[in-house]
Image (tube, grey):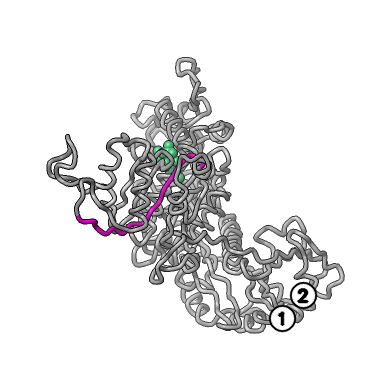
Amino acid sequence: MATVASAVAGHTLNLLDHWQACLVLTDRDGVVLASYGHQQLLGNDAALLHPGARWREESLGHNAIAETLNAPRANRLARIALEAHDAECLKGLASASAALLAPASWSTSRGLTPGACEGCLGLICDPYRVRQYSLGMLGVLADDIEQRRLGEAHGHDHHLLRLHLNRSQLDSPSAALLAITPQGQVAAASRRGLQLLAAHLELTPASDSADTASHSAANTSNSTAHAADSDSCATRDDIHLLLGQPLARWQLDWAPLAQLAEAQCVTLAQHPRFTGYTLCAAPPRPRVVARAPAERSASQPTAEAATRETACHPSLARLHHGDAGWARVCELLARLVNARLPLLLQGETGVGKEEVVKALHQASHRAHQPLVAINCAALPDELVEAELFGYRRGAFTGADPAGREGRLLEANGGRLFLDEIGDMPLHVQARLLRVLQEREVTPLGGGKPQRVDFELVAATHQPLSELVKAGRFRADLYYRLCGATIALPPLRERHDIAGLSRALLTRLCREQQRELPRITPAFLDRLTQHDWPGNVRELDNVLRLALALCDGPTLEPCHVMLAGDCLASQGDCPASEGQIARQPSQASGLPSLHDLSSAEELQSALDALGGNVSRLARELGISRTTLYKRLGAA
Ligand SMILES: Nc1ncnc2c1ncn2[C@@H]1O[C@H](COP(=O)(O)OP(=O)(O)OP(=O)(O)O)[C@@H](O)[C@H]1O
């Protein structure tokens, strides 16, 4: 779910930044899986936005996420007003949230399965900026996530029908989505899909009884501002009448629809109830299953079993920030993480191959076992065998008299990462192949072979298959390494450079224990225009330098120094809003509260800080609520 949510949330990052708002994705227990947007919102309590933090009532008191998760169906959308939060760090902020529900589905073998709550998407924000837009946005994001999850669950063996009155909106979350079996039965439907079918049968939407009780109880709290879900949805009983039914029941003729090629649209001009709707049908898309290795013992889990394990671990979800190519990589990794397949990662230098291996290891069942990384290009030819396989006492001149275990044995029980595998000398390739075949390591100088059990990941920036053709890499080893080959896209092809840059800057500022400067759109624009031959490594360096060059509170395009730019030629940056605000005498650069007596003066100070209410409140030593009250006097 985190992968899908990240892909969806990635589109909102600019907006979140502008609103100084933060989106929090939690699982159904209120445990944070990921967060996006303005991470400084909670100041010293930023850890609440980190994976693992809990937002249930027992941990954090009253808040919208907890409220939604108490009764997810009834409270699909909830909003908590300013003072109603219990936690000190949330006081003066608004929280709003939307439940993320799995689609109700039907199959011949299992019958009807109601959609369970899978998690929650919360928005923590400055209430004066966002107000009612927050719920609208959350509703759209939740619809989008739920639709994508439906496609993920059913798209490989069902036709997906989309209906919308406006052809250009067929791909949007406001379209109705139906999953149809090869026999033409409705197997699942999105919320809007259910509404559309329900309307056709003239079903009257009613509330789910269990959830309604808790909803009413929650509504008795006058500090809670609930937003009723304006999108009425078919009830559980109605779903029995909708799912598992032949599509023909709605007078939609299945045979010609099943023949539609993807992206082909039909306008249902004359249809009795769907008049004016455009319909588009996508045939099933087979799942991508990694190539199985040549041999596998019967006791090992199959690749197919692993493909069922599609939930994306937060450490994998953190690898991308909304780019579709990287989202696909993360999804594949999530499927393969415990599949016991050797993985081969291919990608240019600096794309993040090592980051991927670390994330993969953290997400795997072996996370608590060693991850042993070996850079094959960095080992001198004469030492590489000793390093990998170890040696016995006195095996060669200059060896450690006590002998050495070798890195392969160190990886026993865990994962071995062979970086730059294309640079491994041929004679070492032969020995490694033997280890992979026999799962035994014999140290240099002889001795008893020792059994080893490790997962294997190899990486290279070289086209390994070409090296095989050129006779520089053993074909038999190549086929042992590439149970699944995953190509990592270079940075210039990514569409999430802005989101990635924000994440890298946040990490750097945390490391340097400094406040994250405001990031101007022009700064991000300059980053997205570059080609990034050194990929994420180059971006990381450029951002480090930008932070070092930035004295004020705002990162401007002039702080971006790309390879070849000369520091000495860097002109002065124009004084930013924040620098203008630095005139007064205090260490913080702001006049004291005493000096800012009128609402107009407070407003000017706020404008000078780019509208950052939290920061102004902090600088002035007052709560956000007090600040709003004083601003409200204007
Ligand atoms: N998704 C990411 N999030 C944060 N940092 C990243 C990410 N991907 C890469 N980096 C950073 O970019 C730099 C290069 O990453 P990494 O070493 O994983 O690349 P690589 O592909 O293994 O490079 P090489 O082929 O040169 O060894 C590191 O500093 C790493 O921390």
Which mark is first along the chain, 1 or 2?
1
- Crowd tier of the residue under label 1, counting other residues whose Cα lies within 10 Å: few below 14, some 14–19, many 20 or above: some
Q: Is residue 509 left or right of residue 257?
A: left
Residue located beneath label 1 in the image: 246
Look at label 2 and name its amino acid.
Trp
Q: Residue 626: x percent and y percent?
A: 42, 48
Residue contact at pointers 2 and 1, CB within 8 angstroms: yes
Q: Quadrant of residue 28?
A: bottom left
Q: Is residue 247 left or right of residue 38?
A: right
Which residue is depicted at the point 73% across and 61% down?
Answer: 262
Q: Is residue 225 visible?
A: yes
Q: Residue 459: x percent and y percent?
A: 43, 45
- Crowd tier of the residue under label 2, counting other residues whose Cα lies within 10 Å: few below 14, some 14–19, many 20 or above: some
Determine which of the numbered discs, if any, sits on residue 254 in the image.
2
Q: Is residue 395 left or right of residue 77?
A: left
502 over 168 or under it: above or below: above
Q: Quadrant of residue 146?
A: bottom right
Q: Is residue 614 visible?
A: no
